[in-house]
Image (cartoon, grey):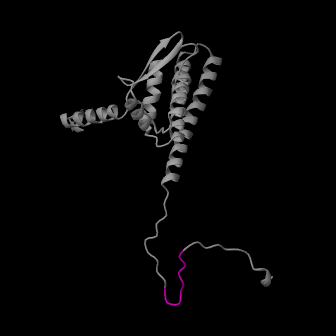
Amino acid sequence: MSKDKNKEIVTDSEIAALKDKVLARREKAPNIKAEMVDGIAKLSIGDKDDEDDTLRLMGAMGVLDLDFLNPFLGQIGNSVSKKDEFCESSMKFAIGFIKSIEPVSEIEAMLAAQMAAVHVCAMDTSRRLLWASNLPQRDSAERALNKLTRTFTTQMDALKKHRAKAQQTVRVERVTVNEGGQAIVGSVAHGGRAEHEK
């Protein structure tokens, strides 16, 4: 962003780049819609609710098994809804959050879903803290908010460590062996002394 007299001005090219990013993500993964039928939320994926939309959502969420996806979506919906009240906007938020993490496996998708649920709870607890009318309500909300925000940070660290472990490689650039030295290539195991040496 260019600056002009302490004001930030967004250029047309920056707006176009942001628009392209939004459209690319939308194309990559369809939205989910919910319709309440006899007190049960019926989910539909994308505009056409066809197999391609389901596969695109699975890809965006790091899910490779349809038997995993269906109950997983139900768990997400339940985790961000209030008692006896399905909250479609919170469900869409949670799925949008999961897609933004770009999980590559079901484990990463589950962790992202937990992070979304913890965030929703933390925001609700923040509201309760701000609206508390007495000291016990304030203390309770403050403790809960502290635990939830710490949990979210721990989950971020867990995701980071999981991804680092998956990408960890060891590369030897160069081995130098001086005169009289030996180089061993392969596995080396060190044990105790042999029986005959004891």
Going by the image, does 51 lie left or right of 109?
A: left
Instruction: Please state which of residues 27 and 54 is positioned toward the viewer in this rendering.
Output: 54
Residue at x 27% of width, y 35% of height: 18
Residue at x 54% of width, y 26% of height: 122
- Whole-percent x, y for residue 194 in the image: 75, 80
What segment carries the magenta color?
A: 178-185
Which image quadrant is residue 10 in? top left
Going by the image, does 186 lie left or right of 193?
A: left
Query: Which residue ends up furthest to the top in the rendered image?
Result: 38
| Residue 96, placed above or below residue 194 | above
| Residue 105, placed above or below residue 116 | below
Query: Which residue ends up furthest to the right in the rendered image?
Result: 198
- Whole-percent x, y for residue 82 in the image: 55, 17
Query: Which residue ends up furthest to the front in the rendered image?
Result: 51
- Whole-percent x, y for residue 92 in the image: 44, 24
Residue at x 50% of width, y 46% of height: 160
- Whole-percent x, y for residue 81 in the image: 53, 19
**Magenta stretch, main secondary structure class:** loop
Residue at x 59% of width, y 25% of height: 142
